[in-house]
Amino acid sequence: MSGNSIYIVRPNIGNPQILQVQDLDNIEITIAGTSESIPKLEDIIADLNDIKLEYKNDNQSKEFPLAFKSWLNLPQRYIDDNPDLSFYDESLRLPLFPTSIIEHQFHAGFRWEAHIIVSLIGNRNDFIAKSKSTICNIIKDTRINYHSICVREEMPNPEKINFLHVTDCHISGRNDLIPQLILPVLEPWQKKIFKSRYLNYNDNLRAIIRYANQRAREGNLDFIIITGDLIDYLHDGYFSGDTYHYGQGKDAPTIPDNTRSNYTKFIEIITGTDNKGEELQVPVFTIPGNHEYYAYENLGAFNIDLEKEVPDWLIFIRVISTILFPVNIVLDLIAPEMYDLRKTGKVDDKVNDDIDKYGTF
C-alpha cells in the first residue's frame, strides 16, 4: 500500500450492495486514502476517473465506466491526533484487537475516508439481459472488489426474504493440499481410512455454493450470511525458532504476501477462480469471528507485546492439552501467560515440533 493511494473500501465482498437497474445512477461508494493529509477534492475526483463495474454473462466479461457524480460526505480523518494505540491490556494480560471499522482501517494504513455517489455510463439493460440477478465487481486501477454489487430485476420481498445462514467455514489453502501431501506416505490400508475420514472445509463451502446457486435459479434464495471464522488463520505457514515462514517448505519466505493469504483462498472459492467449484451467484454478507484474529504472524501490526517467559510446566500442559483437548478455553483462563505461545515463538524447537505434529489438523 503506497503512501498516497486511494482505495474503494466499500462495497466489497462480504459487504455488498443490492441494487435495481435504476439505482445504477446513484451507487454509494466509500473511498479511503493512505496519505497523512487529505488531498484536494479535485485531485481525489481525478484519481477516480478510471472506476469500472464488471460483470460476467455466459462467461463473457463486460465492463462499464463509473463516473463521479457527487459527494455524500466530504473526506474526514479517522483520528486527528494520531494516538499510539497499543491494543494490549496489561491488567487482563490479553491482546485487545481493533474492533470498529475505523480502527481496522487505521491499522491497515488508511488515514481518511469519504463517501461519494457514482453513476454508471452505458446501457443498463445489459444487466438483466439473461438473468434476474447479476453479480458485479468494482475495478479501480488493478484492484478488484469482488462481488461488491448485485443488480436485481426486482428487490426481495421484505415480507419473505430467503437467505442461508452459514458459519465457521475455516477456509485455508492447506485444506486442499493435505491429501496430496499425506497420501503418498501412507500404506494402502491407511489411505483408505484417510480418504473416508478427511474432511475438507474448502469443499464444504463449494458444496454450499452449488446448493445456493440451485436455490437462486429456482427463485428461492436472496443472499447468504456467513457469521464468522471465514478463514482458519491468515497464512499457511510455520515457526522456525523465532522466525515465521509464510508458506510451506524450508524455502518459504519470511516476508508476508497478503495476496496469497487465506482471505485470497476464500475469495477464490466464492468467485470459482480456483477452478474447483462454481462461482456464487447471490450476494454474501460476512462478519468476523475469533479466527479472523488468529493471524499469529501478523500481530506486530497491532503493536502487541507477547514475549513472556513461559514456565516449563505450562508448556508441558499446553502440549498435552493440544493433543487431548484442542479447545483450550479452560487453560487460557487459568494460565493467561500461555495465551497462545505460538504467537511468541519463544519456546525450544522440540516443543514447536510437538505442537506442529499433534496440534495442527
Image (spheres, rainbow, N blue to C red):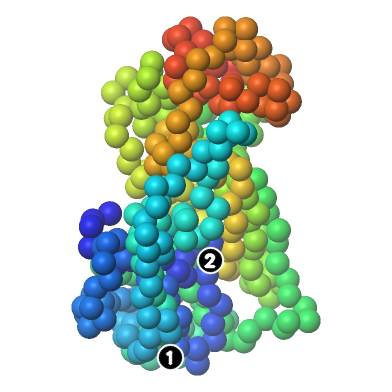
Which residue is pictured at 64% across the width and 63% down the height? 224
96 over 148 or under it: above or below: above
Which amino acid type is shown beneath numbered disc 2? Asn
Q: Quadrant of the N terminus?
A: bottom left
Of helix, strand and loop, which one carries label 2?
Answer: loop
User: Residue 148: x percent and y percent?
Assistant: 47, 69
Q: Quadrant of the C terminus?
A: top right
Q: On the picture, is 221 further left or further right than 90?
A: right
- Residue 15 is labelled as 2
175 over 27 or under it: above or below: above
Which amino acid type is shown beneath numbered disc 1? Asp
Say which quarter of the image contains residue 317: top right
Which residue is pictured at 45% across the width and 23% down the height? 307
Q: CA distance from mark 2 to mark 1?
A: 20 Å
> Circle 1 sits on which residue?
25
User: Residue 212: x percent and y percent?
Assistant: 65, 62
Instruction: Please name whichever residue, 40 or 140, is drawn nearer the observer in this view of the structure.
Output: 40
Which residue is pictured at 73% across the width and 75% down the height? 161
33 over 89 or under it: above or below: below
Can residue 135 be seen in this snapshot?
no
Mark 2 residue crowding within 10 angstroms, few (<14) / some (14–19) / many (20+): some
